Amino acid sequence: MTLDEFDNEVKNMILAIPKEMSQINILMAQTAIPLITNRLINEGKTAEGKSLGEYSNKPISPLFFIGKGLGSGADKKVLDYTKKNKVGISYKTFRELNGRPTNHVTLSFTGETLGDVAVLQTIENGLKIKTIVGSNDRHKKDIVNKKGKKTGTIGTRDNLENLNNKYGMALDTDLLGLSKEESEDLQVIYESGLQKLINKYLK
């Protein structure tokens, strides 16, 4: 390769950097999402290794859980339990009746909120590239008061924000933050993508 050819390849690479780096960013984000959500669900831990806690054993009125279970027989399970035991029902028991794990907080019941986390946008500003991850807000449910009247709706974006306020802020973390190990995994992807970019233009 002559000096002029090398110079042209460098110029072409510089022009291609925003688009190429955007693709690397997106790949890193798409890799990060399941790493983070699987850790939250399977381990119940923040990026710093802090426990998200345990589910409450405090009994409350079964009416709070009516219409919130999974499947057509969910409400009957709640009412049968409270009738048999003559007590209220805790959220932990409610999860057990719905076949959901209770050994640690998973931030997941239907799976819709964490399952809705995705790459939302990539912003290019010269050589600065920012990829935004958050909720697609595809799932919404009605909010119903004790009288059965609809008072509004809540979506997966609202749920994610509420979870971050309840758990993330309490534990001084961002629920979608990366652990040290996860960051190292993404660093490998970044370096590999960067090397491919260099090899592509500087053969």
Image: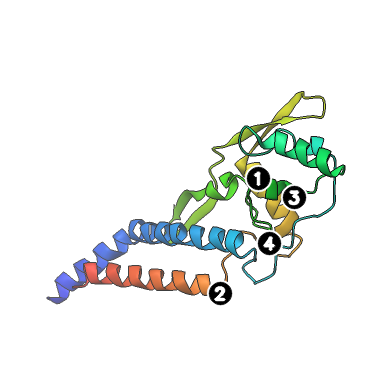
Amino acid under disc 2: Lys
Label 2 crowd bin: few (<14), some (14–19), many (20+), radius 10 Å: few
Foreground residue among 98 and 24 = 98
First in sequence: mark 3 vs mark 1:
3
Q: Which residue bears the numbered disc 3? A: 93
Q: How many numbered circles are shown?
A: 4
First in sequence: mark 4 vs mark 2:
4
Q: Which residue bears the numbered disc 2? A: 180
Q: Which mark is residue 98?
A: 1
Mark 4 → mark 1, Cα distance in angstroms: 14 Å
Amino acid under disc 1: Asn
Label 3 crowd bin: few (<14), some (14–19), many (20+), radius 10 Å: many
Label 4 crowd bin: few (<14), some (14–19), many (20+), radius 10 Å: few
First in sequence: mark 2 vs mark 1:
1
Q: Which residue bears the numbered disc 4? A: 103
Mark 4 vs mark 2: give the one in front.
4
Amino acid under disc 3: Thr
Residue furthest to the right in view is 86
Q: Residue 77 lies in what quarter of the image?
A: top right
- The reply to whether discs 4 and 1 touch (Cβ–Cβ < 8 Å) is no
Q: As displayed, is residue 49 above or below residue 53? A: below
First in sequence: mark 2 vs mark 3:
3
| Residue at point 61%, 65% (across, down) | 43
- The reply to whether discs 2 and 1 touch (Cβ–Cβ < 8 Å) is no
In the picture, measured across the screen, residue 188 lies left or right of residue 12, that is right
Figure coloring = rainbow
Foreground residue among 65 and 11 = 65
In the picture, measured across the screen, residue 41 lies left or right of residue 54, that is left
Task: Name the secondary structure under disc 2.
Answer: helix
- The reply to whether discs 3 and 1 touch (Cβ–Cβ < 8 Å) is no
Q: Where residue 150 sits in the image (x, y, percent)?
A: 73, 25
